[in-house]
Image (cartoon, coloured by chain):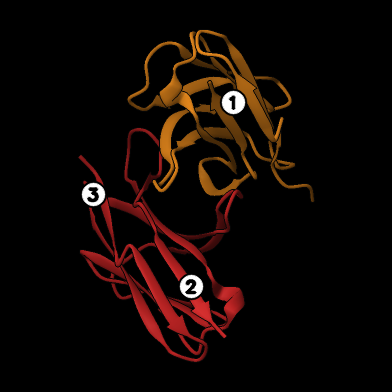
Chain colours: A red, B orange
Amino acid sequence: EDQVTQSPEALRLQEGESSSLNCSYTVSGLRGLFWYRQDPGKGPEFLFTLYSAGEEKEKERLKATLTKKESFLHITAPKPEDSATYLCAVQAQGGSEKLVFGKGTKLTVNP
Amino acid sequence: ETGVTQSPTHLIKTRGQQVTLRCSSQSGHNTVSWYQQALGQGPQFIFQYYREEENGRGNFPPRFSGLQFPNYSSELNVNALELDDSALYLCASSLDLYGYTFGSGTRLTVV
């Protein structure tokens, strides 16, 4: 069964304090790994898709990387507006096209 | 380009009642997926429709059912509501099973 585990569950940073979020996954053939940002009471907002080990993608202060077993979301010099829950999801090859999500990491950036 | 819109945004129902949630796909998208997100959890896959046919189902009982219409909008129906059905229900659309865009969700409270 496909599984996604995210750590830590919650992370509190000072503005400008860089850190990384972890997403460990088990999947029977990875089609894609997705990162989403979710604000309270809202739907997930797409950030990145990674397809193969070694791939990296960047967007503003965020950088996502992928290995065969895990993905990291690096946050450089975060700002208070980066506060949100960050969700990781995997999509397996073949069969249903569902996304399997982790529980997320709740990030709080204090000014 | 319009995004994914869901209605209603909030809903309160009594245990045992039935509910219908609606989703309008992003323009040009032919695939709709529904997810249930309990408080503090990641979204859980309910089912997916691709060109009006069901294309995969998660571990949800038959009282969760759905439809996709020729214009690719969709409905999620839940019969015999239980207290545990209280959650944020998310709709996501995509074109040919790639790149999911989520709506803001419907917050369902069962009392």
Q: Is residue A17 left or right of residue B5?
A: left
Q: Nearer the viewer, residue B15 or A24?
A: B15
- Outermost right residue: B1
Residue A105, horizontal then vertical, whole percent: 39, 63
User: How many circles with numbers are drawn on the protein?
Assistant: 3
- Disc 1 or disc 2, which is closer to the eye? 2
- State yes or no: discs 1 and 3 in contact (Cβ < 8 Å): no
- Disc 1 or disc 3, which is closer to the eye? 3
Residue drawn at (69%, 27%) of the image: B73
Are there few (<14), some (14-19), or many (20+) residues within 10 Å of tag 2? many
**Residue B74 vertical placement versus A20 (above, below):** above
Residue drawn at (35%, 52%) of the image: A103
Residue drawn at (30%, 75%) of the image: A54
Are there few (<14), some (14-19), or many (20+) residues within 10 Å of tag 3? some
Q: Nearer the viewer, residue A45 or B29?
A: A45
Q: Secondary structure at mark 3?
A: loop
Which residue lies under the disc numbered 1? B51
Labels 1 and 2 share a subunit: no
Q: Nearer the viewer, residue A92 or A15?
A: A15
The disc placed on residue A27 is: 3
Whole-Å distance between the Cαs marked 1 and 2?
40 Å
Are there few (<14), some (14-19), or many (20+) residues within 10 Å of tag 1? some
Amino acid type, label 2: Thr
The disc placed on residue A108 is: 2
Q: Secondary structure at mark 2?
A: strand
Residue B66, horizontal then vertical, whole percent: 55, 18
Whole-Å distance between the Cαs marked 1 and 3?
26 Å
**Residue A54 vertical placement versus B43 (above, below):** below
Picture quadrant where residue B18 is located: top right
Amino acid type, label 3: Val
Q: Earlier in the sequence, mark 3 or mark 2?
A: 3
